[in-house]
Each structure stands twice: as C-alpha cells, then as structure tokens.
Amino acid sequence: TDYIPYEITHRPEPFHPEYRPQSGDMDHHTTYKTDFSPHKIKPVASMRPPPTKPGKGAKIDTVPTYKDDYRLWDIPKRKPKAPDAYCPPKSRFGNPSTFQDDYGPKPYALRESFKPPDTQRASDVPFDGLTNHKIAYVPHPLGERYVRPPDEYKPSDIPFDNITTHRRDFRGLHGDPTKSFKPDPGKLGSDAPFDGNSEFRDRFQAWPMTLPYVHKHPEYVQPDGPMDLNSTSHLDYVGHKVKPPSPFKPASTRKVHAPFQGSTTMKDDFKAWDLKKPEIFKRVEEIGIPDAKFDGLTTFKANFVPHPIKLTQSFKPSHALPHSGVPFDAGTLYRTEYTPKRLEICPASYPTPPGYIYENTDSRGHKFFHKMTSSEEKLAVPNEMLIPKEVAVAS
C-alpha cells in the first residue's frame, strides 16, 4: 500500500552506423617513407695520424740461432716394407685385423742413435784462475780483539729478610672473617625402626566407591492412529497473487543484421599450401635375411678343442689338530695360590655402623667412632638382636 510505482525512462543508446568495408587496396605508405630522402654519405676519415714504424727501410734477418746452428739432415724417405696388396677373404669370419697382420711377434733389434754426442769441448788456453777480487784485494793487518774482563762478584752484607712486595704492601682487610652458611652436618637419620608408612598412605585413604549412575531410557510406545504430516507453515501460510519482479537492467537492443564477414588480411595474403605427407625413407639392409635354418653354431663351438683339466696340488697344511696321549693338566697358578677371603662390608655405608659407638663430629663434618668392647656390646645389644659376624653378599 505504501509503494508508489514511478515511470522509468530508458537512456538513449548511441547510434552505431552499419559497418561497410572500404573498396580498393591499402597503399602501406607512412610519413617516414614519404618525407625521408636518403643521401649518399662517405665514411668519416680518421683525424689520427697514421702510425709510423721505426726501421722501415732496413731488412730484418729472421734466421734464429737455433736454425743457424742446427741444420736439417738429408734423410731419405723409407720405402714401405710390405706391399699394399689387400685381398678380402672369401670365406665367412675370415677377416683378420690389421693388428694381427702387421704386428706379429718379431725380434727386437737396437737401432743406431743419430743424436750428437753430449761431450764438452775442452779449450787449449791454460786456466789462469785470476779474478778481480784476487787482483784488487789488499790484505790489511788485524789487531788483537779487546776482551772485557768480567766483574768480580761481591756478596751483599744485608741479611735476606724473605719479604715480597705482596707481603710488604698487602696488609689484609679489616673485619671479621666470613662465616659459612652451610648447615650443621648433624645426624639426619632416626633410631626408630622403619614402619614402612608414608605420607601418601597416611593421608590418602581408600574412599568407598559406588557404581556410576546409568540413565535408563523409557520403553518406546508406538502412538495410535495415522501420522499428521501437516506443518505450521502449511496450515498458516496464505498464498498471494504476486507477479515476478522485472529486472532494472535495460534490455540490449543492439543487433547487427548484416552478414558476418569472416575474411581477414591473414587469410587473404597467406593462403594455405597444398602439402603432401612426406614418404617414409626405408633404409636398405646390407645383410640379407638367410633362407636356411639357423644351425646355432658359433666360432667358439666350432673351433674349441677341450683339454683335460689337471688339478693343482694344494700345499696348504691340513686343519687336523695334533692329539696327545698325555691327559690335560687343568691346574693354574690362580687355582693353586688363590686363598678365598671373607667379604667385609664397609661400616661407612651404615648411618650407625654396628659394632661401633659414636664419639663426636668435628668442624668439617667428619664423624668419629670407636669399637665396642665385649662389656659394651652386652649392654648395648639385647640377646635377640645379635651383631652378625659374617655378611652374605649376593652377586
């Protein structure tokens, strides 16, 4: 009832004229081609003067001392020993290699060395052995070296006081010495017998436990009569005659009625060539397939001659142990000289060692005990608690 419809005016669309292709060909001319005129330009001459080479008129002797001193020898070219008469074999697998033909077992002969002898040429002039040092050196007389006499040792008359700089300068700090905050190493154990109770056993007693509560679901009872499938939406909903909303977007009225021209410059200038599929080049096999049945014989099977195998004699000693008829003597020095001793437990492992009486504790925490006499043992230990003289240790 509150909604008032207004008249909606559509916006005018721009006018698009129909596309018509131009007639004629494209000239492909640009402003650069029409305005630019090429000019003939000579290469720029260099302003740098040409380099002058010293000694241009003189001729250089390019013969080094190596070529001048070591002349080439006129060595005639050797003729090949064997003629080059290769005849391919007609039989199958009869092709020996060049190594087998040319490099056979031949005797080795030493060749003559044409190297010049490495000997020194001795001079005919006698050796004088004079040098500039021998000619120009003038020996001067040397005087005796001055030796300083050592000073005589004179012991000091002042007695040795045995005082260092630390003892002389350090006098110590004023005040009382620092006290130790370490607790008094007193007796930490108790003489009461161990009852085996702990704090957990004393304070945490067992609580009476009951079974957890389990909720019992009531037994399902099926309702009587058919099921009503109507919901509140079906019962209370009232249908209204309402038209579907119209879109606010204006409809597009631009339509081109001209036929579509699918030709492009690419399709016009570059026509598709008629290409044929290239033929497959098959390589002609040099060795043909034989018609006869394969015999399975190889050169090894055809030419192999079996020889009897001779087993080599083994010189390895046998693993048999030498046996002796004398019975084995199992006696050792340990068995003959060992004396079994009784194991004693260190009394320091006990908080109160049995058989000892506590005396006092020094400033460092060391406890002092003394052994009980026979009279003290009777007074200290009752008849039912006797001190064991031997202690068995389980290993």
Image (cartoon, helix red, strand yellow):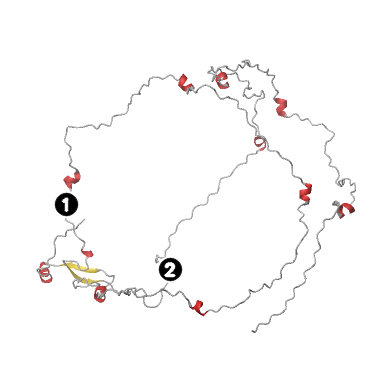
Tell me where residue 387 sits by quadrant. bottom left
Which residue is found at the position 24% from the left and 69% from the top? Answer: 367
* Disc 1 element: loop
When asked about the image quadrant of residue 216, the answer is: bottom left
Examine the rendering and report whether any part of residue 186 can be seen. no
Spot occupied by residue 275 in the image (x, y as percentages of width and height): 71, 40
- Residue 340's label in the rendered image is 1
Foreground mark, 1 or 2, reads 1
Instruction: Compare residues 140 and 225 and report the one nearer the observer.
Output: 225
Three-letter amino acid code at the position of disc 2: His
Q: Position of residue 292 (x, y in %)?
A: 52, 21
Looking at the rendered image, the quarter that the C terminus falls into is bottom left
Q: Is residue 353 among the parts visible in the rendering?
A: yes
Question: Which mark identifies residue 166?
Answer: 2
Task: Please determine whether, in this image, residue 337 is positioned above or below residue 110.
Answer: below
Observer-nearest of 350 and 16: 16
- Where does residue 384 sit, x and y in percent of width and height? 10, 68
Q: Label 2, secondary structure: give it.
A: helix
Q: Upstream in the sequence, badge 1 or badge 2?
A: 2
Query: How far across and how far down the image is residue 342, in percent?
Result: 16, 56
In the image, what residue occupies the spot 42% across and 66% down?
Answer: 164
Q: What residue is rendered at 73% in x and 29% in y?
A: 64
The one of 21 and 297 positioned closer to us in this rendering: 21
- What crowding class fits label 2: few (fewer than 14 Cα within 10 Å), some (14-19), or many (20 or more)? few
Q: Residue furthest bottom?
A: 2
Q: Could you tell me how many numbered marks the image carries? A: 2
